[in-house]
């Protein structure tokens, strides 16, 4: 990433962390921020964790220019990892970034394992995209649709209402609503970047242990995408979180943290303990 712009990065290094163990880097999804992983990080208090606000979001809103390609987000993630052995955990759009980083061309990979929770992959086919919005909303989810290029703030509000719910939006303070609207430009840029006619990477060549998570109550497009990934990725594992939907890191942090711990153990087993 350009030296003149920095991302807001938070590291938690427990005093008794095992030497040589991988860093766990958590990558948030669209219209989200690092703080959404707080409950999960508290349950990984003996693990070296890294969270960051992605370019254009929250504390990294001034890190410009915005990424207009998935590759730009991957570059940022690799810069945050900074050459350290890592297990990368991506939620939603963050899962695409994590997978793309693990599939970067050869060399000694710093990414030793991947967790992708319900990553949107609209290029897989119509079943993996969001159905057309009967209300004709212009704001898109990462699973399909088109964002509103004329009003990013309005697009951000519509996205939040669609993905989290009207009631959740109304519970936000006016300051919190303004913060979400201010993330609109970053949201639009990345939703445009993921609307691709063909896959940006080939998961069938993934050379590290991978875990694909989904919620028991998630939309069928998310569940089907995760099932496809687990079936078509070498050393892929499917984990379903009971009672959860797309926001499992918020609603089911214990189960989400358990999934992360299992992925770290698989990465260590694959290369010998410790990583």
Image (cartoon, grey):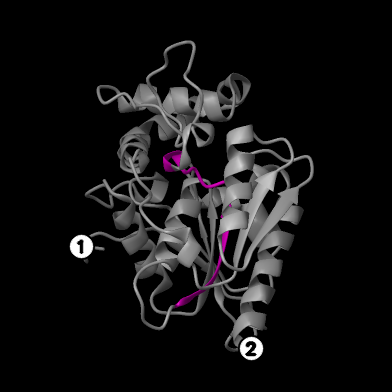
Marks 2 and 1: CB-CB under 8 Å?
A: no
Q: Which residue is mark 2?
A: 272
Q: For the residue labelled by badge 2, is the local secondary structure a helix, a strand or a loop?
A: loop
- Image vertical order of residue 267 relative to residue 75, above or below: below
Callout in the foreground (2, 1) = 2
Residue range of the region highlighted in magenta in the rendering: 110-123
**Sequence order check: which comes first, mark 2 or mark 1?**
1
**Residue 22: within the magenta?**
no
Looking at the rendering, in which quadrant would you find the C terminus?
bottom right
Q: Nearer the viewer, residue 251 or 170?
A: 251
Is 245 on the left or on the right of 2, as rendered? Answer: right
Residue drawn at x 42%, y 12% is 136
Task: Read off the residue under disc 1.
Answer: 4
Residue 186 in sight: yes
Secondary structure of the residue carrying tag 1 is loop
For residue 15, say whether it is visible: no
How many numbered tags mark residues here?
A: 2
């Amino acid at each position: 990433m350009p030296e003149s712009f920095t991302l807001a990065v938070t590291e938690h290094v427990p005093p008794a962390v095992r030497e040589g163990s991988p860093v766990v880097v958590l990558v948030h999804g669209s219209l989200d921020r690092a703080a959404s992983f707080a409950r999960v990080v508290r349950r990984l208090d003996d693990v070296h964790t890294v969270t960051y606000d992605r370019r254009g979001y929250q504390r990294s809103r001034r890190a410009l220019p915005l990424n207009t390609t998935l590759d730009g987000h991957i570059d940022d993630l690799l810069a945050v990892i900074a050459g350290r052995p890592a297990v990368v955990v991506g939620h939603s759009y963050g899962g695409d970034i994590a997978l793309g980083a693990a599939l970067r061309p050869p060399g000694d990979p710093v990414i030793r394992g991947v967790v992708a929770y319900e990553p949107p992959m609209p290029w897989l086919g119509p079943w993996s995209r969001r159905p057309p919005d009967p209300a004709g909303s212009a704001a898109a989810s990462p699973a399909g649709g088109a964002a509103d290029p004329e009003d990013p703030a309005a697009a951000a509000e519509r996205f939040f209402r669609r993905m989290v719910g009207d009631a959740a939006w109304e519970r936000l303070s006016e300051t919190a609503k303004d913060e979400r609207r201010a993330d609109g430009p970053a949201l639009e840029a990345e939703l445009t970047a993921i609307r691709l006619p063909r896959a940006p990477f080939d998961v069938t060549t993934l050379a590290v242990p991978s875990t694909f998570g989904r919620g028991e109550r998630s939309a069928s497009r998310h569940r089907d995408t995760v099932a496809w990934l687990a079936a078509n990725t070498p050393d892929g594992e499917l984990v379903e979180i009971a009672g959860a939907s797309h926001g499992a890191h918020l609603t089911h942090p214990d189960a989400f943290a358990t999934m992360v711990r299992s992925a770290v153990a698989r990465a260590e087993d694959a290369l010998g303990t410790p990583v």
